[in-house]
Amino acid sequence: MVNNLKEKKIMKKRILNIIIGTACTAVLASCAITLPVAVSNAPIGDKKGVSSTIVFGGIYFNGNYGVKDAASKGKITGAIATIDEKTSNFVFFAKKELIVTSK
């Protein structure tokens, strides 16, 4: 009987470890995609600005998120050549980044 109780405890511990490992993997797993938003006739250079935000339930948590914020972070004052949006989806939320480039 003692042997059976030990085996049950070991089995419970293994199942708990599997559940915790699966939960951690699910929370840390992500999928990212980058899509073009806009392109202009401005020359593409080495200046790059990024504006990022977290999205949870359709709510954007960065009030400054946008092209203007990305351009100011990249010190872009002239015409913007390209705008890309990178979306990284996690289990409970998403991270969005607007990437602007210019000369």
Image (spheres, rainbow, N blue to C red):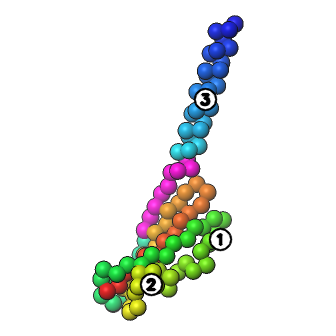
Residue at the (58%, 67%) spot, across then down: 54
Looking at marks 1 and 2 on the same chain, the residue that comes earlier in the sequence is marked by 1
Which amino acid type is marked by label 3?
A: Ile
Tell me the number on the disc at residue 15.
3
- Give residue 5's quadrant in the image: top right
Eyeballing the image, is 8 above or below 55? Answer: above
Closer to the observer: label 1 or label 2? 2
Q: Left of 53 or right of it: where is 98?
A: left
Residue 31 part of the magenta-drawn span: yes
Which amino acid type is marked by label 1?
A: Ile
Residue 27 part of the magenta-drawn span: yes
Q: Which residue is mark 1?
A: 59
Looking at the image, can residue 100 be seen? no
Secondary structure found at label 3: helix
Looking at marks 1 and 3 on the same chain, the residue that comes earlier in the sequence is marked by 3
Q: Left of 8 or right of it: where is 103?
A: left
> Which range is magenta?
26-34
Looking at the image, can residue 102 be seen? yes
Q: Left of 77 or right of it: where is 19?
A: right
Eyeballing the image, is 12 above or below 74? Answer: above
- Give residue 58's quadrant in the image: bottom right
Residue at the (64%, 25%) spot, across then down: 12
**Which image quarter is the N terminus in?**
top right
Q: Left of 78 or right of it: where is 91?
A: right
Looking at marks 3 and 2 on the same chain, the residue that comes earlier in the sequence is marked by 3
Mark 1 in CB contact with mark 3 (< 8 angstroms) = no
Secondary structure found at label 1: strand
Q: Which residue is mark 2?
A: 71
Image position, residue 95 (x, y; %):
53, 65
